Amino acid sequence: MARSRGGQPDNDNAAKGKMFTQALRRALARAKGAGTAEKGLEKVAAKLVSAGMKGQQWAVREIADRIEGKPAQSITGADGGPVQLVGAVKVTIVDPRAGS
């Protein structure tokens, strides 16, 4: 992982995500003579809506998720009960001026 000037790791996943987004934009612009990514995306959206109107459940779910947001998922422990803590964290503060 690359390091930034402050010594903290850079977010390589964000850079990869941007590369993928740029590749998608280029592909959308090239698709069937769309000319621009926006026009290509309009065509993709129209096909999605068309599939949803034909009753394709995957398309209906995608449209609903995009418009309403995905439903919240609960986090539960064993047998649907509450999540149990498995361990604890112990913090020890040491005075560097104290002799050994």
Image: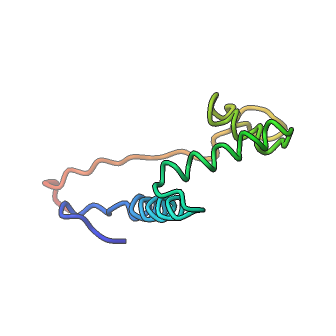
Q: Where is residue 55 in the image (x, y as percent from the top left)?
A: 86, 38
| Residue at the extreme front of the image, as rendered | 33
- Residue, x 49% and y 59% (percent of image)? 29
Rendered image quadrant of residue 62: top right
Choose between 74 and 61: the one closer to the eye. Answer: 61
Choose between 55 and 13: the one closer to the eye. Answer: 55
Q: Where is residue 67 in the image (x, y as percent from the top left)?
A: 62, 30
| Residue at the extreme left of the image, as rendered | 97
- On screen, 52 above or below 22? above
Q: Quadrant of the N terminus?
A: bottom left
- On screen, 25 above or below 67? below
- Residue, x 26% and y 51% (percent of image)? 94
- On screen, 72 above or below 32? above
Q: Is residue 4 left or right of residue 20?
A: left
Q: Is residue 6 left or right of residue 73?
A: left
The colour mode here is rainbow
